[in-house]
C-alpha cells in the first residue's frame, strides 16, 4: 500500500480503478473484477495526453503507472497485487 498525497482518495469507499483502456495490465484487472462480479468506479487515465503525469495522478501513484486500485481508501499500485 502507498499513502497518497492526493488525499481525497483516502475518503473513498468501495473499489475505484484508475485505468487506461488499451493497457494490458489494466485489462487484466478489469477482467478479474468482472469474473468476480465486483463492481467498481472506473477512472479513465488518458496516457496519450499524459494525464498520468499530472500532479493529481502522481499524488496517487508517484510512478505514474496504471492500473491503480483504491479500495476503501487504501491505494494498491501493482496489477499482480490487485
Image: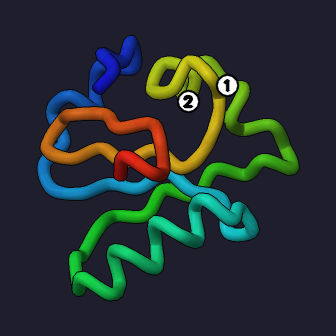
Q: Give the residue furthest to the front.
A: 80
Which residue is at 39% across, 12% downward? 5
Q: Is residue 52 left or right of residue 10?
A: right
| Image: 2 above or below 22 | above
Label pair 2/1, CB-CB below 8 angstroms: yes
Residue 65, image quadrant: top right
Q: What secondary structure is marked by label 1? A: loop
Q: Position of residue 51 (x, y in %)?
A: 72, 38
In this figure, what is the number of numbered marks?
2
Mark 2 crowdedness (10 Å alpha carbons): few <14, some 14-19, many ≥20 = many
Task: Using residue 47 as the reference point, say whether residue 70 is left or right of it.
Answer: left
Name the residue carrying label 1: 54
Q: Quadrant of the N terminus?
A: top left
Q: Is residue 50 above or below residue 8?
A: below
The quadrant in which residue 7 appears is top left
Q: In percent of the image, x 13 and y 49: which residue is there?
A: 13
Write the residue at 33% across / 64% down.
Answer: 41
The local crowd at label 1, few if under 14, some if 14 to 19, many if 20 or more residues have their Cα within 10 Å, is few
What residue appears at the point 24 percent right and 57 percent down from the top-left corner? Answer: 15
Scheme of image coloration: rainbow
At which x and y percent is residue 60? Answer: 45, 26
Q: Residue furthest right?
A: 48
Between the residue at mark 2 and the residue at mark 1, the CA separation in whole angstroms equals: 5 Å
Element type at marker 2?
helix
Residue named by callout 2: 57
Which residue is more in the foreground, 80 or 41?
80
Amino acid at each position: 500500500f502507498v499513502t497518497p498525497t492526493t488525499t481525497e482518495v483516502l475518503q473513498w469507499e468501495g473499489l475505484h480503478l484508475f485505468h487506461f483502456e488499451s493497457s494490458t495490465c489494466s485489462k487484466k484487472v478489469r477482467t478479474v473484477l468482472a469474473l468476480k462480479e465486483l463492481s467498481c468506479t472506473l477512472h479513465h487515465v488518458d496516457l496519450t495526453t499524459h494525464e498520468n503525469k499530472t500532479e493529481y495522478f502522481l499524488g496517487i501513484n508517484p510512478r505514474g503507472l496504471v492500473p491503480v486500485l483504491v479500495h476503501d481508501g487504501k491505494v494498491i499500485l501493482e496489477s499482480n497485487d490487485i
